[in-house]
Amino acid sequence: MQFTPYLNFDGNCAEAFAFYAKLFGGSIVYQGRFGELPAEPGMPPLPEAAKNRIMHVHLQVGAQSLMASDTMPVAPGQDPDSCGGGYRKPQGLWVSIQVADVAEGQRVFDGLAQGGTVAMPFGKTFWSPGFGMVTDRFGTPWMVNVPTQP
């Protein structure tokens, strides 16, 4: 069994995943936009504002995956709970990354911190030679951790 985090964005998913692919040394194996969806009978027309948004993206980093999509924009007067509810900032979770050593942890943390908000600076803790918490400029909360070596 493997768990795969699935992130949501408000129109900047493509930019975020291009950044993550470079930072984490991975490759985007699929990226599709809402405007590329085939027409289905009974489906309402796609709003123009949604056509360029990412319907699904899959980033592969070694044996690990990270997936995401943009949410559908909520039109004025539209129920915000329709179509997945529109974008809401992540709450009650962190995406945790385990890295091989302190140097790699610092590199990843510094990359995520560019334009983001540091909740806990990267440094030594009682459980780890390197740990930090940051919400990146795209709104995703991350924990970067170097496991203690036996």
Image: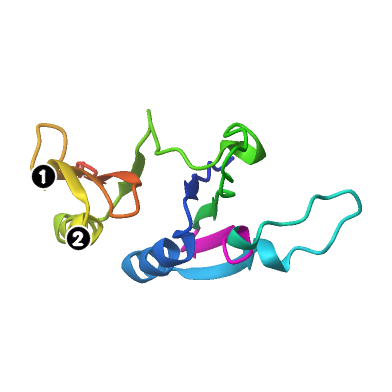
The spot of residue 94 in percent (x, y) is 35, 37
Q: Is 83 situated left or right of 103 in this image?
A: right
Q: Residue at x 58, y 69 (%)?
A: 29
- In this rendering, the answer to whether 43 lies above or below 86 is below
Residue extent of the magenta highlight: 50-63
Q: Residue furthest right?
A: 41
Q: Residues within 10 Å of mark 1 (few under 14, many from 20)?
A: some
Q: Which residue does the numbered mark 2 point to in the structure image? A: 114
Residue 19 sits inside the magenta stretch: no
What residue did someone put label 1 on? 121
Q: Secondary structure at mark 2?
A: loop
Choose the circle earlier in sequence order: 1 or 2: 2
Question: Three-letter amino acid code at disc 2?
Answer: Gln
Q: Residue at x 48, y 47 (%)?
A: 7
Q: How is the image coloured?
A: rainbow
Query: Residue 110 at x, y = what percent?
Result: 17, 59
